[in-house]
């Protein structure tokens, strides 16, 4: 019960603190913040344009009135208006129809003469412009009326050098601002819809983007020392795909390390058991006779030397998968082949021959490892031939690859053994162990060739000898 009780809070914390939720929350905060700022800025811009439009409308009406005062004529007699301000007001109000929300007011001697509307603003307006005809100044301002704020432009009417009256144009701002509010309301609802749609898309995209991370998590949870085969699908060229590929490369290295460790332990346990048993048995049965003691010491020493060689071979195979296994350098292939032939002559009394007519050129490889591989092949050839039999060591450079081979005239390799002889502890004579080898020589040759990026080929005819060829690239990609 306690475990179940603890699981629910952990699950809730994962829901709240999950990467997908954090990404979505960050996205929403950014999107909501930018939407709010955009709406505020849009409101200010629209209100500013409303005021500019109202001011232009007021100025246009005043300009038309001034043209009538300056150039107009009384339609009753065709004469200029002169000082007849009432006639000017009558003609202008008769000819002009105010726009929506506009109103025209005329004042003579501080009192309302006529207006185009019975708007309740006129009383407040009269108090605002009282004394305007005496000062002779144009006034642009706002008043608060029962219908809301009203913006007005009042100009004195000057005829023959005297102020004869006041002409006032007003516009109620409530309707204009209501239009702005309606536009903002539409913008807000549209933004909310876009926000909801964008949130859904962001949720789906975040899940798709984080899918490789969930795969990485699941893969990491499923890894154990007995199963390192799972890999994360890596598609695309983005950072998460690179992370997946990097994680897969790490798993490859771990799998190789675990496999190498497992093989080492298995091989050591398998192969060391016999010599340890032999040594223990002889030591337990060893008596006081000097001759018997001497024979026992020789036998134990021989077994210990074989165990030492075996452990060295196992360590070499374990290191073969490490990146620093090779120490590459430039080699003259012809000189290298000649040196191999000279070294092989000390292995056994055979007719050693050199075939290096196509070895003119240089390669980049590990001299010591290649020497070890070819010497293993030479030792194997000597083991399956008789004194005086010919053994050929050859080398050639062709098509960007170097080939080093050892050809013997021994019994050849049976067809059933041609695939398995490169495995550890494999012998061409079946499962019977030989006293002079543990079956690791050809496995070491293959490991060295593969470390160079190459391979080992076997060409054999049963009863007529075998040819083992190490094939490596002309330039080995290895750490120096």
Image: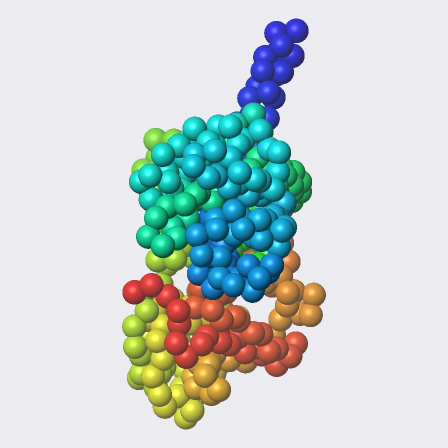
Q: Is residue 462 visible?
A: yes
Query: Which residue appears at 43% of the width and 28% of the height?
Result: 127
In this view, the residue farthest toward the top is: 1
Q: Position of residue 322 (x, y in %)?
A: 40, 54
Q: Is residue 313 visible?
A: no
Between 226 and 163, the one lying in front of the other is: 163
Quick one: which residue is furthest to the right in this view? 416
What residue sits 45% from the left and 83% below the top? Answer: 400
Residue 96 position within the rendered picture, expressed as x and y whole percent measured from the top left: 60, 53
Q: Residue 463: which quarter of the image? A: bottom right
Q: Position of residue 440 (x, y in %)?
A: 49, 57
Which quarter shows the N terminus?
A: top right
Circle count: 0
From the viewer's perspective, is 158 left or right of 86?
left
Q: Residue at x 60, y 78 (%)?
A: 459
The answer to which quarter of the image holds residue 461 is: bottom right
């Amino acid at each position: 019960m306690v475990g179940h009780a603890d699981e629910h809070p952990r699950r809730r914390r994962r829901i709240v603190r999950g990467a997908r939720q954090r990404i979505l929350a960050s996205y929403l905060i950014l999107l909501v913040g930018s939407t709010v700022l955009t709406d505020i800025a849009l409101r200010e811009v629209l209100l500013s344009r409303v005021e500019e439009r109202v001011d232009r409308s007021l100025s246009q009406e005043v300009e038309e009135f001034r043209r009538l005062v300056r150039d107009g004529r009384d339609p009753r007699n065709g004469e200029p208006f002169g000082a007849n301000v009432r006639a000017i007001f009558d003609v202008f109000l008769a000819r002009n129809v105010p726009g929506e929300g506009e109103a025209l007011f005329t004042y003579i001697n501080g009192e309302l003469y006529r207006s185009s509307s019975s708007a309740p603003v006129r009383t407040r307006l009269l108090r605002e412009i009282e004394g305007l005809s005496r000062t002779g100044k144009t006034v642009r301002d706002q008043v608060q009326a029962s219908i809301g704020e009203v913006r007005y432009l009042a100009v004195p009417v000057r005829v023959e050098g005297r102020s004869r009256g006041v002409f006032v144009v007003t516009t109620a701002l409530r309707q204009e601002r209501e239009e702005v509010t309606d536009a903002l309301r539409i913008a807000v609802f549209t933004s909310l819809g876009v926000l909801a749609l964008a949130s859904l898309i962001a949720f789906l995209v975040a899940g798709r983007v984080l899918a490789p991370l969930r795969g990485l998590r699941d893969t990491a949870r499923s890894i154990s020392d007995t199963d390192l085969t799972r890999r994360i699908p890596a598609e695309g060229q983005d950072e998460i795909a690179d992370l997946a590929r990097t994680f897969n490369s790490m798993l490859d290295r771990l799998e190789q390390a675990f496999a190498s460790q497992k093989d080492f332990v298995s091989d050591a346990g398998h192969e060391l058991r016999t010599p340890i048993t032999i040594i223990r048995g002889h030591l337990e049965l060893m008596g006081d006779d000097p001759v018997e003691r001497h024979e026992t010491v020789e036998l134990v020493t021989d077994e210990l030397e074989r165990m030492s060689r075996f452990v060295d071979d196992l360590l070499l195979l374990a290191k073969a998968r490490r990146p620093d296994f090779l120490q590459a350098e430039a080699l003259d292939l012809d000189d290298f082949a000649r040196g191999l032939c000279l070294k092989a002559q000390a292995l056994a009394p055979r007719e050693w021959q050199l075939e290096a007519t196509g070895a003119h050129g240089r390669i980049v490889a590990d001299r010591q490892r290649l020497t070890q591989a070819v010497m293993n092949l030479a030792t194997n050839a000597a083991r399956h031939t008789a004194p005086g039999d010919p053994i050929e060591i050859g080398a050639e450079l062709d098509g960007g690859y170097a080939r080093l081979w050892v050809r013997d005239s021994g019994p050849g390799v049976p067809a059933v053994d041609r695939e398995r002889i490169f495995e550890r502890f494999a012998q061409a004579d079946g499962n019977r162990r030989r006293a002079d080898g543990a079956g690791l020589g050809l496995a070491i040759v293959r490991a060295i060739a593969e470390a160079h990026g190459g391979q080992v080929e076997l060409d054999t005819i049963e009863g007529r000898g075998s040819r083992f060829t190490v094939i490596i690239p002309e330039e080995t990609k290895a750490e120096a």
